[in-house]
Image: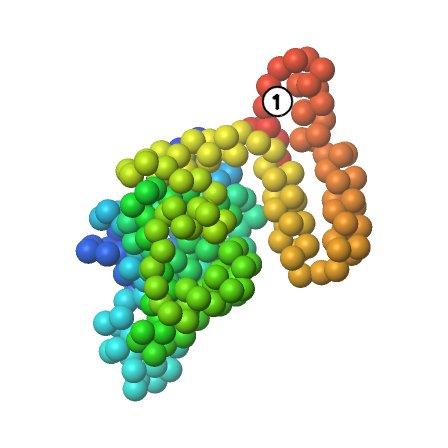
Amino acid sequence: MIETTIDEGVMTLELNRPPMNAIDSDMARALAEKLGDAALADCRVIIVTGANGGFSAGSDVAELAELRGASNGPGALLSAQSVAFERLAAQAIPTIAAVEGLAMGGGAELVLCCDFIVASESARFSFPEVRLGVFPALGGTVRLPRRIGYDRALDLILTGREIDAETAMNWGLLSRRTAQGEALDAARALARKLAMGPKATLATIKNEMRAALHIPETEATAQALKSAIAIGDSPEAAEGLRAFFAKKRPDFSNLP
């Protein structure tokens, strides 16, 4: 259901639930467990991708229908999904979505939880919940406007229409666009580069940039300065400076 590999500090999580990797409660709980696994302490980057020729068709509509009228109803599925999605979004280390084929509804919302979105020319993105009379409850109404702007996000969410990879790139949704079949390779190349970087410094930069979205500019710049001063006294900065003067590549791999 969630295939996991770890290679050189990069954890790859592959959604594998044929035929379209629909996210049911079991898959959501499995994903949350993987993201909270103690092995993450040794990981420096996470890649999320899909098997079966696509990323994910979103929430399991059959399970949603089955849960209607039951105790807690669809909330049981959404709660399980929310734990996994928020755990991914809150990761301190860099995260990458590698997208081939369809990323729909909850699948597209899972993509939005990642820092980088790498998609091939085959990728298609949509938020079709409105067509079922349901709400995109897993962050789409929040994260999509922050990626592509309010007007474009409102268009996609209220109409449920689909956009291709070229449009997604032009709108600023994607970090990289590749030829068909090459999204995961491109994501792995990016992940390897990030994994060689200073883990604590990358996490601090990511945290400060996220925080800056929600606080006044003067407060954000003051906090960034404090973080820069703290990082300047860190073992990572010492290694970076040592390597610079030695004209060598820094080695951050064994630092705490």
Q: Amino acid at mark 1?
A: Pro
Q: Residue at x 30, y 86 (%)?
A: 69
Q: Residue 39: tell me if it is visible.
A: no
Mark 1 residue element: loop
Image coloring type? rainbow
Q: Position of residue 18 (x, y in %)?
A: 20, 55
| Nearer to us in this view, 186 or 152 | 152
Question: Residue at the spot x=36%, y=74% of the render?
Answer: 130
Mark 1 surroundings within 10 Å by alpha-carbon count, few (fewer than 14), some (14 through 19), many (20 or more)? some
Residue 12 vs 24, above or below: the answer is: above
Residue 224 located left or right of residue 13: right
For image coordinates 44% across by 40% down, the residue present is: 176
For the image, the number of numbered tags is: 1
- Image coordinates of residue 86 in percent, x first then y, are 49, 60
- Point out residue 239 in the picture as x, y percentages from the top left corner: 67, 24
- Which of the 4 image quarters holds residue 81? bottom left
Residue 230 is situated, as x and y percent measured from the top left of the image, at 76, 40
Residue 202, picture quadrant: top right
Q: Is residue 133 visible?
A: yes
Near-viewer residue (7 or 99): 99
Q: Residue at x 46, y 35 (%)?
A: 191
Q: Hey, which residue is sitting farthest top in the picture?
A: 246
Q: Which residue is mark 1?
A: 250
**Residue that protrudes farthest toward the left in the picture:** 19
Quarter containing the C terminus: top right
Establish if 67 lies above or below 41: below
